[in-house]
Amino acid sequence: MADDHTFHMAPDEFRRHGRSVIDWIADYMATVEAMPVLSQDRPGAVRARLPAHPPEHGEPFETVLSDLTSVILPGVTHWQSPNFFAFFPANVSGPSVLGELVSAALGIQGMLWTTSPACTELETHMLDWIVDMLDLPATFGSGGPGGGVIQDSASSASLCALLAARERVTEGAADKLGVGGALTVYASSQAHSSIEKAVRIAGLGSDNYRVVDVDDAQRMRPEALEAAIAGDVVAGVTPCMVVATVGTTSSMAMDPLRAIGEVCRRFDVWLHVDAAMAGTAAVCPELRGLHDGLELANSYCFNPHKWMFVNFDCDCFYVADRRPLVAALSILPEYLRNAASEAGDVVDYRDWQVPLGRRFRSLKLWFVIRHYGVEGLRHHVREHIAIAADLAKWVEAERDFELAAPVSLNLVCFRHRGGDAFNQALLERVNASGAMYLTHTVLDGSYTLRVSVGGTNTTRAHVEAAWDRICAAASAPEGLVP
Amino acid sequence: MADDHTFHMAPDEFRRHGRSVIDWIADYMATVEAMPVLSQDRPGAVRARLPAHPPEHGEPFETVLSDLTSVILPGVTHWQSPNFFAFFPANVSGPSVLGELVSAALGIQGMLWTTSPACTELETHMLDWIVDMLDLPATFGSGGPGGGVIQDSASSASLCALLAARERVTEGAADKLGVGGALTVYASSQAHSSIEKAVRIAGLGSDNYRVVDVDDAQRMRPEALEAAIAGDVVAGVTPCMVVATVGTTSSMAMDPLRAIGEVCRRFDVWLHVDAAMAGTAAVCPELRGLHDGLELANSYCFNPHKWMFVNFDCDCFYVADRRPLVAALSILPEYLRNAASEAGDVVDYRDWQVPLGRRFRSLKLWFVIRHYGVEGLRHHVREHIAIAADLAKWVEAERDFELAAPVSLNLVCFRHRGGDAFNQALLERVNASGAMYLTHTVLDGSYTLRVSVGGTNTTRAHVEAAWDRICAAASAPEGLVP
């Protein structure tokens, strides 16, 4: 073999295969609606279609692309189907996919400013644009002591918030000596599981995670929070962080930020606000009430990768003061030293996150915001909310169904009056049909169905069809419960 | 505005713009060699080229793409240039970029098996293929009590290893009660900074991080490790984890795994092996000695996103026993419950990592391994190593230069005999030229230049030209030190 032989895909081959992949994707976008939303594969089915061993010799790209259709697609649950109503959306869009493509091809590392200035500066700039777009507190902008950064997920944002809060309350002792005494974290019973996960990861221990009671609309009760903190202080325990949720996973409940923030100020406890799903709504001025009191928070996050047409991963995480965050996460070995960092006039985002490496994710935000304009994002958020409101009316009009929680933004929680087993069977039947995918939760002790309206291509017609099918399944003559 | 108006990019628009982006990338691939490797932008230059506020109305995609060239590219440090020799490579390839593209477009979440079976099963299968390709211990395969998972980075892999080790040594008490007594972690003075970062994140405290001495080839001294552990045991401290590095960041030193593993077995301490950079080399049978003793490890990671032509992020993390990992990271809220998970016959990778969400990263591995075949990967690894060996000879042949460490795999550490200030000035001069980018470290107290040969398109000619330029800069008549 000649010394200059190469196995690489040359630029012109990339051009050719790239077009095939773009066509494959455009076709997928145009046809995904007709595919069963929830994969019909049984466990092991995908692996059974794959060869046991890696190929010794390279294969033509055409074969790989055709296997993508035959081997992989049947095992895919189609999150981009307009009939996907499960969990929360993870919606994507053309401009976002192309932004991710450019990021992959540039293949740069943004761990330090100097390792690609554009990666750091576009990120800072996009996070500032978003402060503007959502009318977030000015302290989250890069001009003052705080600032924003992209994390992979709200889970990682919560962990980073906790590390900063731990740094602040222990004045660095936890980083040096380890978590010695009890440090407590407070969130409502409806908070995301990632909060308790962060408490465990950071070495605080789940026994020091305080689950705060909620009211009958699943919102944290500030007086219960206050009592919990006060009790811990009396007991000699150190309150470390409170997490308020704007849009809970089960029912999109909104914790009362201002009242919670005032409790936090009184006890000097770090307040982190998790608006992973709902934050995007603040692009609409009439919905900004959900952030009322946010200026009392020390940190905040929301996920453009849920409802802002940016593909995963892209969580925007803000701190009002970046010092404790950087103090908690910065370690500088010799091989990362460089003139720009030493001069102190640049941001090195490696010190704002758990990993060292980071890709050029702000390109996706830049592409999406410029493609849609703020106007376009607002339009689609309003439309999803209007469709959810319609669905709520249809539920209320059906004698056999009831709403299980106040409808909030784009999420409708409801149940059939037939009881838990009936609702579970109903869910399984409609999901098995392949025509839609929805998931459940438990509210006030009862099994509850959730329809989350947020798919890029979900229209009123899709939700109408889904509701018709749910009603038909519920009244099927053969019955639902065995 | 009509109710059915949409701001989305329709499939056929995506087809058109997608082709433009593919062409842009193919052109970039073909021309990146001629661009200044290290961005010449000053701090703030990129932001100064961006509008202060987000656009109210959407813009044509053509404008965005043309701004990519004019606004962003000057601020990019070109990690994919064949003249990039800094840090470690983060090499990418055509098939990998196309795999990432498909992953972005499918936009699925792989947190649970049921949320897209193909995401979980292809990942398990690719991690098994890699056990085969690198001849890793069979315990890392999915058939037994262990298994593999993709993490974003070796930093996150080390953190997860530590959480599993903490779970095991405290029998779950740390997760429940918090990190109470002192738990210690051991690594050599040459280990990656992410190890100490993980120790701090997990709440152990940097005072409980033990830096173990190295020999004159920068390898951990097993007898120093043994003494440190024995001393801690006598002092009533609990050894939690040892990290051995296969290919250190400064000089690609290889810690003696087998001797370290035997110490760990004797004291029953978790051994994590960080082969982030060097692991890929084991695709070549003649290089597998670097993993000798790996069967004594509890966990292991390496990064296909460094040297295996897979774009960031893609770290392969293996455990010999998955139970402590899952016990440390699993929390099951109602809204994630599903039949497949309850039946216990599937893997849910959310319990193997810090975040909840995860994208379809195994597509990149599948595309790359099938495109190159094991043969192709082996060929390029061997070529990079051969080029580094040549460079080492050229260094040794120059009277004014010396090797600063034994050459290991594809990294050459060297210095000019003119002293630290001279070498620093030399580095700055060659980097400022734009013709190449290399970085430094400190070995045995002296400033050291590093040339890391691992770019996808780096050939012997590029390294020769780089060496000529380094020699020319060192002997420039105007001198280097002001």
Image: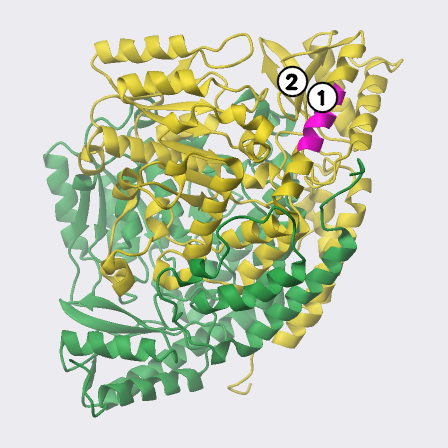
Chain colours: A yellow, B green
Q: Nearer the viewer, residue B429 or B174?
A: B429
Q: Which amino acid is tagged 2?
A: Val
Quarter of the rendering occupied by the C terminus of chain B: bottom left
Vertical arrangement, residue A41 with respect to residue A368, above or below: above
Q: Is residue B234 left or right of residue B387?
A: left
Q: Main secondary structure of the magenta part?
A: helix
Query: Given contact means CB atoms under 8 Å apart, are the residues at marks 2 and 1 in contact?
Result: yes
Quarter of the rendering occupied by the N terminus of chain B: top right
Q: Residue B233, position in %: x, y?
A: 14, 36
Q: Which amino acid is tagged 1?
A: Ala
Where residue B341 sits, quadrant-wise, is top right
Q: Residue B304, position in %: x, y?
A: 47, 59
Q: Residue A248, position in %: x, y?
A: 54, 23
**Residue at the far right in the pictured view:** A477
Q: Is residue B217 left or right of residue A122?
A: left
The magenta stretch is: A382-391
The residue pinned by badge 2 equals A407
In percent of the image, x 66 and y 63: which residue is there?
B62
Q: Which mark is residue B151?
A: none
- The answer for which chain carries disc 2 is A
Where residue B303 sits, quadrant-wise, is bottom left
The residue pinned by badge 1 equals A389
Badge 1 element: helix
* Residue A57 in sight in this render: no
Vertical arrangement, residue A413 with respect to residue B35, above or below: above
Vertical arrangement, residue A42 with respect to residue A411, above or below: below
Badge 2 element: loop
- The answer for which chain carries disc 1 is A
**Residue at the far bottom in the pictured view:** B477
The alpha-carbon separation of the residues under discs 2 and 1 comes to 7 Å
